[in-house]
Image: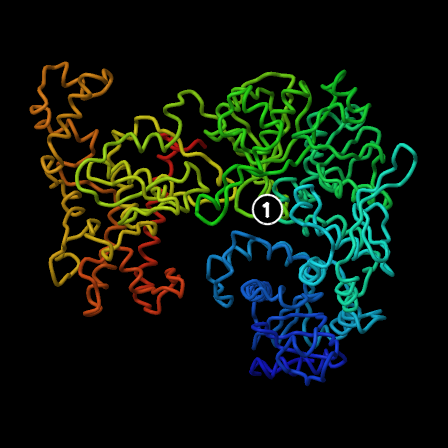
């Protein structure tokens, strides 16, 4: 069948429903989702087709949620992204069981995508779902598209109406409700088992006789009771090796044989004689088809609370990176590495990192969580290649090595150089980024309760790095399994971060080989940064100076190489933070800026503000703790420019900004380019609404202002008309005197050696030019900077022609806010309805991009970044 391209969207939906889905019980509109196909479970009354879903009337099992578009030539993948944003924004999966498939169609074509292929995207904690799904130009839309593009291309089924009618009908017949033998219950599969768990928590958990807070402290979590329920028939758990099993009217866990040969176990009963449990499982068909069992068991991590995941390392390492890491091990250790080395994953989780290894005699897996041990044992039934006694519970940050299996202990004691510690360790630290931004809580107890922390925080001076859990893994491995091969996934901070200087002084090993890949390819890991797999020979004690690794994108495409360097030559001159805080902040305050950390991941906090802000504790917010005055305006402009003119990517996200060499001080073009870049960057948040705006780089005549500006500072600064005396001669004299007495290498002191008095020094045009960077002559700008100023001037002029509602002292930020407006949360909209403004701001941004490219090479030349 083919459809009229002029059909309205509602008409198109009705026709497609009738032509392809008429055999199904219900076609419904759910909240903001355009189109859905469901099998209906009647509870109270019949509903007509096309009626909006009401959970009071029935609970539906969905086969399809779809995005509809009228006409043709729509990008089917973009339609999927719009649908995903719609689902995520409304958290529709929390209110309704998700479908087997997502769909997208227009009058020309229809596409289907298995829901489980993309359901992990909804667990992103740092993604802004509060955007308009239909805005295909938003940053979030593009970010999501990039994240799932490969999945959409590889996993979606696309058909054309008319030519592919038979294929469409076959697909629907084969995938929507086929072999459905129990129409009264919702079928559980890999699409919906996580969402049904959420419903189980609400309905069943409280009826189980367990003190959940105390149980959690002992490592017992509710998800294991749910798995015992889910993989059951007639209230008997079918897989006996699970940590918790259901036995008719109670649960059993921690089952062991005592010295007399008796089976002992803990039990948990039901407070309500199992009523809530029985009522819940009347709605859902269990067990799921056996083809889903291994997947559900293997993805237990999806049911583990985030705080436990980060502490225990319940992260699912993608098979593509497990395979790639094993290729790298073979390339440095030889083709027979599995025969010649023992391999121990001491943070194994459910053991997926070891998948693909073949020499069962040499593979060991341990984890802190008995439930994970039981899952690995349960997987043996499906042919998982390990010996049963090589899988064991072991808390690496607390347990003594005497608890290890005898054969593994012998390898550690007698032949550690033939042992590979192969891990993707857990990640948690005493303070995380959410805490820094006021949205999270300190994780101190997570990271500082173990015996390894207690021991090495006293014995070794590792600084704050010991508060990272993966550091605790590394240092115990290094100290107590000497000469082993360490092959680990982790962030790169232990190689290049200034916070790990002391760690690198202690951890000395030869780097053999490694690669980086995007962190967001790992399930339950959010963020745009690199995860590295690095192989170290700890028997060769070499100081870490730099590592050169291969780069792979999400498609496993090799993108080249990247170096991560350790800068430890001078601890007082390591980071850009130490550099920028060395400059005086004398004179009238022009604004504020700050620093949450000297790397790309913290650039999002970087801004210029009119006011200082405080955090909940009452302390100054890091983002506004530096004062900006005439004496440090040029260094501040350089500071912002070098950090903001190169776009952040997942590859450079953890790169450290460094203390530069002195060559930049003589490069006036570079300094002036940075001033221009800072004035017109979007992170310049100066606003006349919060006080006097000192940041207008034009005169009233140049922009057609109707009244005098309250401040002419920036224009006078650019024109070299800021009097040095206005900046307090006393401060300069004091500074000079200090330099003469205390700083024998300072250029101030050179004047003192020549017999120049402080007052004479102030009159010397060159004395403070280089140190306070206050120009005494008009600044000379490059062509690229001049183009930026000209584009900015046009924008200012247009603003001053728009009427009486403008602010005569408006800043660049005020002008943008005036034209673009804000949303209900006060965030500036991405675009304006004023097309002339859109044209002007685009021209300005294009000119800024050109200026940024001019600045970029100098960033590496002067040592702010290492290439």
Q: State the residue position of label 1.
A: 525
Residue 337 spot, x, y in % from top left: 76, 26
Can the viewer see residue 114? no
Q: Position of residue 207 (x, y in %)?
A: 72, 59
Q: From what the image shows, is residue 300 above or below residue 50?
A: above
Compared to residue 283, the image places residue 558 above or below, namely above
- State the residue in front, 486 or 144: 486
Name the colouring of the figure.
rainbow
Q: Which quarter of the figure has residue 392?
A: top right
Above or below residue 87? Residue 627 is: above
On screen, residue 373 versus residue 514, left or right, reads right
Note whether 196 is above or below 37 in the view shown.
above
Q: Quadrant of the N terminus?
A: bottom right
Q: Quadrant of residue 209?
A: bottom right
Q: Is residue 393 left or right of residue 499?
A: right
- Quarter occupied by the C terminus: top left
Residue 568 appears in the figure: yes
Count of numbered circles in the view: 1
Q: Position of residue 341 (x, y in %)?
A: 77, 24
Q: Residue 181 sits in which quadrant?
A: bottom right
Frontmost residue, 375 versus 542: 375
């Amino acid at each position: 069948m083919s459809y009229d391209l002029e059909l309205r969207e509602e008409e198109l939906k009705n026709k497609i429903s009738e032509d392809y889905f008429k055999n199904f019980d219900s076609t419904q509109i759910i909240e903001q989702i355009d189109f859905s196909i469901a099998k209906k479970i009647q509870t109270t009354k019949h509903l007509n087709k096309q009626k909006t879903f009401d959970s009071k009337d029935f609970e539906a099992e969905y086969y399809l949620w779809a995005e509809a578009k009228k006409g043709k030539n729509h990008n089917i993948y973009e339609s999927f992204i719009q649908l995903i944003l719609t689902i995520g924004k409304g958290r529709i999966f929390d209110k309704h069981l998700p479908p087997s498939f997502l769909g997208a169609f227009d009058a020309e074509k229809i596409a289907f995508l298995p829901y489980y292929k993309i359901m992990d995207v909804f667990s992103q904690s740092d993604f802004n779902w509060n955007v308009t799904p239909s805005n295909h130009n938003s940053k979030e839309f593009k970010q999501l598209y990039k994240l799932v593009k490969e999945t959409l291309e590889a996993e979606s089924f696309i058909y054309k109406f008319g030519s592919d009618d038979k294929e469409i009908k076959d697909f629907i017949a084969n995938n929507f409700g086929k072999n459905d033998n129990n129409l009264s219950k919702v079928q559980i599969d890999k699409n919906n088992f996580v969402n049904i768990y959420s419903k189980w928590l609400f309905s069943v958990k409280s009826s189980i006789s367990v003190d959940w807070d105390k149980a959690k402290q002992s490592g017992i979590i509710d998800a294991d009771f749910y798995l015992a329920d889910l993989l059951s028939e007639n209230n008997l758990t079918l897989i006996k090796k699970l940590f918790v099993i259901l036995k008719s009217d109670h649960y059993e866990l921690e089952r062991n044989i005592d010295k007399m040969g008796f089976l002992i176990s803990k039990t948990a009963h039901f407070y309500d004689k199992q009523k809530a449990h029985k009522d819940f499982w009347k709605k859902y068909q269990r067990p799921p088809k056996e083809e889903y069992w291994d997947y559900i068991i293997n993805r237990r991590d999806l049911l583990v609370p985030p705080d436990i995941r980060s502490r225990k390392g319940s992260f699912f390492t993608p098979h593509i990176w497990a395979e790639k890491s094993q290729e790298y091990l073979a390339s440095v250790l030889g083709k027979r590495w599995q025969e010649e080395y023992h391999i121990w994953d001491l943070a194994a989780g459910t053991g997926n990192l070891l998948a693909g290894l073949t020499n069962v005699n040499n593979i060991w897996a341990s984890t802190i969580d008995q439930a994970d041990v039981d899952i690995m044992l349960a997987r043996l039934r499906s042919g998982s290649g390990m010996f049963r006694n090589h899988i064991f519970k072991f808390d690496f940050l607390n347990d003594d090595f005497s608890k290890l299996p005898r054969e593994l202990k012998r390898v550690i004691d007698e032949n550690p150089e033939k042992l590979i510690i192969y891990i993707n360790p857990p990640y948690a630290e005493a303070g995380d980024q959410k805490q820094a931004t006021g949205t999270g809580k300190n994780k101190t107890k997570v990271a500082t309760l173990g015996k390894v922390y207690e021991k090495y925080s006293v014995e070794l001076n590792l600084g704050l790095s010991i508060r990272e859990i993966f550091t605790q893994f590394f240092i115990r491995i290094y100290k107590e399994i000497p000469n082993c091969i360490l092959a680990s996934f982790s962030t790169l901070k232990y190689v290049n971060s200034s916070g790990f200087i002391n760690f690198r002084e202690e951890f000395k090993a030869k780097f053999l080989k490694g690669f980086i890949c995007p962190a967001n390819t790992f399930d339950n890991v959010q963020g745009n940064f690199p995860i590295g797999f690095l192989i170290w020979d700890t028997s060769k004690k070499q100081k870490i100076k730099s590592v050169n690794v291969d780069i792979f994108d999400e498609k496993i495409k090799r993108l080249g190489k990247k170096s991560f360097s350790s800068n430890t030559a001078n601890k007082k001159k390591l980071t850009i933070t130490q550099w920028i805080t060395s400059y005086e902040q004398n004179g009238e305050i022009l604004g504020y800026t700050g620093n949450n950390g000297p790397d790309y991941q913290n650039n999002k906090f970087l801004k210029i503000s009119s006011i200082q802000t405080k955090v909940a504790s009452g302390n100054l917010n890091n983002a506004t703790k530096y004062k900006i005055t005439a004496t440090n305006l040029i260094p501040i402009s350089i500071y912002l420019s070098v950090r903001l003119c190169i776009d952040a990517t997942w590859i450079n996200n953890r790169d450290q900004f460094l203390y530069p060499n002195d060559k930049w001080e003589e490069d006036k073009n570079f300094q002036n380019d940075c001033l221009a870049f800072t004035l017109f960057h979007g992170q310049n948040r100066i606003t006349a609404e919060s006080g006097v705006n000192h940041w207008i780089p034009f005169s009233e005549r140049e922009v057609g202002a109707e009244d005098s500006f309250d401040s002419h500072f920036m224009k006078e600064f650019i024109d070299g008309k800021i009097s040095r005396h206005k900046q307090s001669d006393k401060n300069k004299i004091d500074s000079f005197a200090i330099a003469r007495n205390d700083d024998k290498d300072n250029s101030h002191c050179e004047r003192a050696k020549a017999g120049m008095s402080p007052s004479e020094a102030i009159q010397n045009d060159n004395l403070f030019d280089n140190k306070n960077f206050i120009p005494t002559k008009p600044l000379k700008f490059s062509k690229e900077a001049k183009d930026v100023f000209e584009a900015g001037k046009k924008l200012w002029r247009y603003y001053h022609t728009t009427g009486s509602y403008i602010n005569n002292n408006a800043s660049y930020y005020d002008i943008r806010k005036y034209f673009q407006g804000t949303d209900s949360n006060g965030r500036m909209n991405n675009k304006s309805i004023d097309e002339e403004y859109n044209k002007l701001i685009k021209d300005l941004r294009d000119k800024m991009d050109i200026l940024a490219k001019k600045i970029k090479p100098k960033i590496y030349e002067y040592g702010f970044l290492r290439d």
